[in-house]
Image: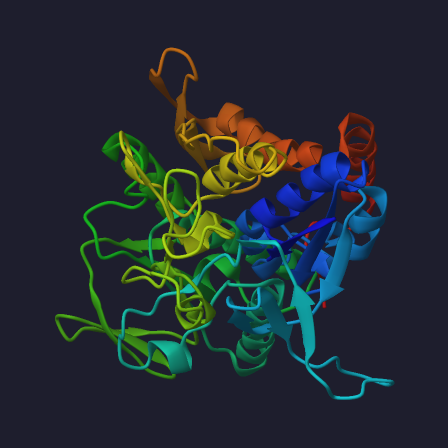
Amino acid sequence: METIVIVGGGAGGLELATRLGDTLGSAKRARVVLVDRSHGHFWKPLLHTVASGKCDPQVVELAFPAQALEHDFEFVQGEVLCLDRAHQTITLAPRHGKGSDGACRTIAYDKLVLALGSVTNFYNVPGAAGHALTLDSVADAEAFRRRFNEACIKAGEQGTQVDVAIIGGGATGVELAAELSTSARALAAYKVHALDPDRDIRISVIERGQYLLPQLHPQQSQRAARHLRSLGIEVLTGTTVAEVTQDAVIDATGAVHRADLTLWAAGVEAPQLCATFGLQVNHLKQIVVDASLCSANDSQIYAFGDCASYTCPVKGAAPPRAQVAHQQAMFLAELLTRRNGTPRPHFRYHDYGSLVSLGPQSAVGVLTGAVTGKSVRVGGAVAGLLYRLMYQKHMLSLHGTLRVATQALADWLRARILPPVKLH
């Protein structure tokens, strides 16, 4: 029986494992194995809600073993150390904890799918890697939340101000700034800190380009900037960061922006691991794939999502977005069920638009019709509702209608009972 190993349980990797388990795994046509170093899945576009305290990851996170049991695939927790293409095996780091013999583990594959996601790209800016926080994982987001709360409490005791600098005016930076402003007010209302959110907490978004959210129309970008400023957030566009220190961000003009906390959200690249496999990669360490998402060097290895470099013949390079990973996961789920020797189809990316949250009740973005290809700009409460539905769509691909409806009801009840932010 063929063994298909999927490395990475992000939005695309888990969707692919779930679908292949439901088709090949349940029919005993293939052994489907998902490998991830974490024990559970969290949808990466929502990491900013963890960083702001709005979302408790322990409640939302999906346990890989539970999903594997329900959908006929196997889950192995472990960090990939290396790939042996000649023997078609991957090597995992030793298990930790009681009962571990300290030995590395090896998993053989017939087909290997790499869905390793992305990590922060600091672009070699001096001090950025050492002093700036990131939102690459749930652990990173929780670390930022704790640091922010501690900084607010300390500043309240000393009667000083808290300065937060968010570098990067893309979706992550804008969404975090908006949520953080809301959370700061909620924490003050619950007396977690003694600061006046409007006077004592200063949040800045620093963007190198002329506009925030460069993937949107300039009018939408300006609308987002106005909304952030209405929340008291400072928006600095056309500002290039030259250095990051422990308590400041220095731009290319030499201006110093004080920062008790600095978060880097200015770009991504593939993990360094991708460059160690002996596969062709681009300047961002992304694995170069063909029209079927197959590695340019090895016909038994596929890559997709943020760790892969796929260029659409019409739209150009696919952006590092969850929408792309979802479409590629569905494509590979169909391709890998085909019998060996049948012609491989070609993946085609369809851009259905982009939505960016501006807080609990608002969003901004553009929607593109699947048939007409026409784009419609949206904003306000309607866009906010559509933004929340994106997550529900992701959960539908993993659980089905009944489970998602039940979870939505539970979330609604939880929101009526519990505080809107984590208080500790």
x and y, in percent, of residue 113 in the image: 55, 52
Query: In the rendered image, is residue 145 in sight?
Result: no
Report whether 158 appears left or right of 346: right
Q: Residue at x 41, y 52 (%)?
A: 295
x and y, in percent, of residue 205 in the image: 34, 57
Q: Quadrant of residue 259?
A: bottom left
Residue 324 to residue 209: above or below: above
x and y, in percent, of residue 360 in the image: 57, 40
Report whether 247 appears left or right of 156: left
Extreme left residue here?
253
Q: Residue at x 60, y 36 (%)?
A: 333
Callout count: 0
Extreme bottom residue here?
102
Query: In the rendered image, is residue 174 in sight?
Result: yes
Q: Nearer the viewer, residue 385 or 20?
A: 20
Q: Residue at x 67, y 34 (%)?
A: 397
Residue 230 to residue 177: above or below: above
Extreme front residue here?
341
Q: Nearer the viewer, residue 245 or 348?
A: 348
Report whether 258 appears left or right of 324: left
Q: How is the image coloured?
A: rainbow
Extreme top residue here?
372
Q: Nearer the viewer, residue 101 or 366?
A: 101
x and y, in percent, of residue 211 in the image: 24, 45
Quadrant including the C terminus: bottom right
Report whether 69 appears left or right of 119: right
